[in-house]
Amino acid sequence: MDMKETAYSPVVQVHQSVAPGAIESTCEFCLELDGAPDTRFHSIYGAKHDRIVARRNRIVAMPTLGQLFVGSLLILPDFHCETVAQLRPDERQDLLDLVNLMKERVRSFGFPLTVEHGARQGSGSGCGIYHAHFHLIPLPEHLHFGELLADAAKPVSSLDEALDAAADLPAYIVCQDTWGSVALADPFSSSPNLFASQYVRKRLAARFGLCEEWDWRSYHEPEAKLLETLSIFGANNVPLS
């Protein structure tokens, strides 16, 4: 298999700059991945560190800021693209391959939930960062997509099918629940509340009675859960093939 996959030790690897012209100067993720010292992650954990734990070509995995559950990851391209549905077919395949690889790694933490709240800039949706990213969240118990998306959920056969259907939408939520079932929700058939900023994080915090703050922007100090996630992935390493 002619794919470049690498594993990273926790908070020690300095990320190489992405290709010129491939970053967006106002995007938090682009700036962090390009090594800018004044991003949120670098301001908390230090400018010489990064949080990448795995890579497949131009797709990376890194722990989520504001960890609701240990082992929570973001899977995203290291170049700017607003939604996963907008990626080229080969890029999308790399992302889904890395999702599946990391899903096996996080099973030791819990039942993996895979979610993208895709939003284009100007849609008024999403978390305020318009850079494509999937959330991979290990939950303490099974969760059906209906508990997140309610009547807005449209069952589909796969993440690929959901992303194909979302390609022209300004905003959407794609969810693969802990049972492996997939659903799509779009703003034209949903309650406006479903597409409020960080809706999924807020819903999960309420569903599992978490005392942690659901808003990732409220975290300004090093997180024990994020450091634990980095430590575990660094100690165990991600298989290279």
Image (cartoon, helix red, strand yellow):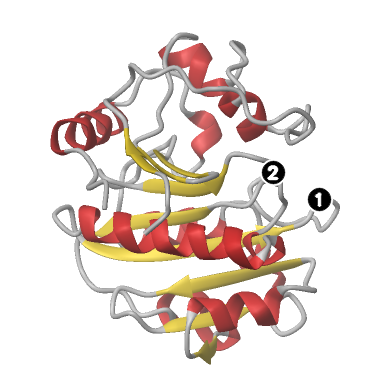
- The kind of residue tagged 2 is Gly
Mark 2 highlights which residue?
A: 128
Label 1: state its secondary structure: loop
**Mark 2 or 1 closer to N-term?**
1
Instruction: Please report the residue visible at 22 percent of the width from the left and 31 percent of the height from the top.
Output: 234
Instruction: Please report the residue visible at 80 percent of the width from the left and 74 percent of the height from the top.
Output: 168
Q: Point out residue 92 in the picture as x, y percentages from the top left corner.
A: 57, 63
Res. 177 visible in picture: yes
Instruction: Please report the residue visible at 41 percent of the width from the left and 64 percent of the height from the top.
Output: 114
Single out the residue that lies furthest toward the front.
2
* Camera-nearest label, 2 or 1: 1
- Taking the image as shown, residue 75 lies to the left or right of residue 34, namely left
Q: Point out residue 125 in the picture as x, y percentages from the top left corner.
A: 72, 57
The Cα atoms of the two marked residues, 2 and 1, are separated by 8 Å
Quarter that holds the N terminus = bottom left
Q: Point out residue 145 in the picture as x, y percentages from the top left corner.
A: 42, 79
Mark 1 highlights which residue?
A: 121
Give the quarter of the image for residue 144. bottom left
State the residue in front, 224 or 87: 87
Q: Residues within 10 Å of mark 2 (few under 14, many from 20)?
A: some
Give the quarter of the image for residue 4. top left
Q: Residues within 10 Å of mark 1 (few under 14, many from 20)?
A: some
- The kind of residue tagged 1 is Gln
Can you say whether 103 is above or below 27 in the image? below
Label 2: state its secondary structure: loop
Q: Point out residue 59 in the picture as x, y percentages from the top left corner.
A: 51, 47
Can you say whether 71 is above or below 108 in the image? above
Res. 193 visible in picture: no
- Taking the image as shown, residue 53 lies to the left or right of residue 47, namely left
